[in-house]
Image: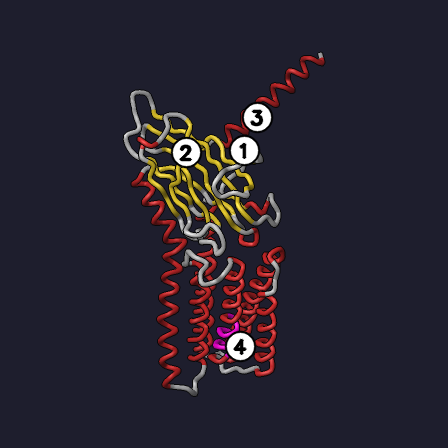
Amino acid sequence: MMRSWLKYAFGICLLICAWQSYAQQIVYPINQHCNVRVLSISSAKTASQNKSPETGWENVKLPDVWDIRWKNYNGGVWYKIDWEWFCEREHSLNQPIVFALDYLNSAGAVYLNKDLLWASQHLQEPLSKSWNMPRYWILPASGLKPGKNQILVYVNGYAFQNAGLGKITFNNVHENIKHHQKSLWNKRTLFEINAILSATLGILCLVIWLFIRRDNSFGWFALSCLLWLLFISQFLTTETYPYPTTLAAAQANLSFFILYILCFSVYLLRFADRRFPVLEESLFVFSIAVIVGIFFTPLDYAKIVLGTVFLSYASLLVVVYFYLAYLSYKTQKTELYLLIFCLTLIGLFACVDVVRLGNAETA
């Protein structure tokens, strides 16, 4: 009786192991007759950017943020993707396979069967940035092994920036172009359009302010546009330069965001013909102290400090929005209703962009 139960238990364990192995395998169609099967994806910490470790590999699912399992780990990580291609009987692979990577955070390198395909310009500080840059590589059939192939991805990044590896796909050239263009639209083109519009409006308001100095709301708006451009530029640049380190770049970027929120809030109040001299001056002095504190924040506390400050100042803009909504209801002024309508649209578009960007990373 005991032996029977042991056999059943052993059989169940085998089924569970087999299911886990099968669940990790993902099949990507290349054409009607050929497919790519991902056999396993694993990662391991490393002290070397030139050689993958022999031990320490852990199975992962992509997209992966390594801070979830390796708390506050900063440095290098290797990702190993074992895969194979296969075709139906009497068919052969007569076209290249495209390997696409949604993002890697922050700098890295990609190898196919230990041959280098691509590497960031700077794998050490100041690190290159690829977290908002989708990439792909065309793998010719003649360069692939008939059986199992292996892609190694080296990533160097920081826990406070959610370092890790994004979603991967295998496809044919034509289908990959469609996917890549959509990903570029979500991750880069939208920010480029935003930057162009902000620069145009900022220059226009600056010119108006230079001719009409008595209305300083245009000056505040022009200044807020400049600060917004400095902030959003970090979403488009692929190098940390001119900053010496990734942490310094993040600290400077958050400082631009703080000053943008303050200037834009003052612009909104001036547009509504409201002034709070003591409160405004106090906020600016306090914010300067916050910015100084940001630059003295050690790396281990960067994630919680930078995240808390960002949410706090974003909340300040929300408070100003509701104050203006109350003011428009109280005064019944048409221009305030129009301002609230525009701010609401901006908020909705911002939420949609965040959701789309998140879906693009996890789809």
Q: Which residue is mark 1?
A: 54
Q: Residue at x 30, y 25 (%)?
A: 92
Q: Quadrant of the C terminus?
A: top left
Q: Locate residue 135 relative to residue 321 in the image: left or right.
A: left
Helix, strand or loop: magenta stretch: helix
* Element class at badge 3: helix
Q: Camera-side residue: 300 or 126?
A: 126
Q: Nearer the viewer, mark 3 or mark 4?
A: 3
For the record, the magenta segment spans 261-269
Q: Residue at x 42, y 46 (%)?
A: 102
* Element class at badge 1: loop
Q: Which residue is mark 4?
A: 327
In the rendered structure, which amino acid carries the disc numbered 4?
Leu
Q: State whether residue 76 is above or below residue 54.
A: below
Q: Residue at x 54, y 59 (%)?
A: 247
Q: Are marks 1 and 3 in contact (CB under 8 Å)?
A: no
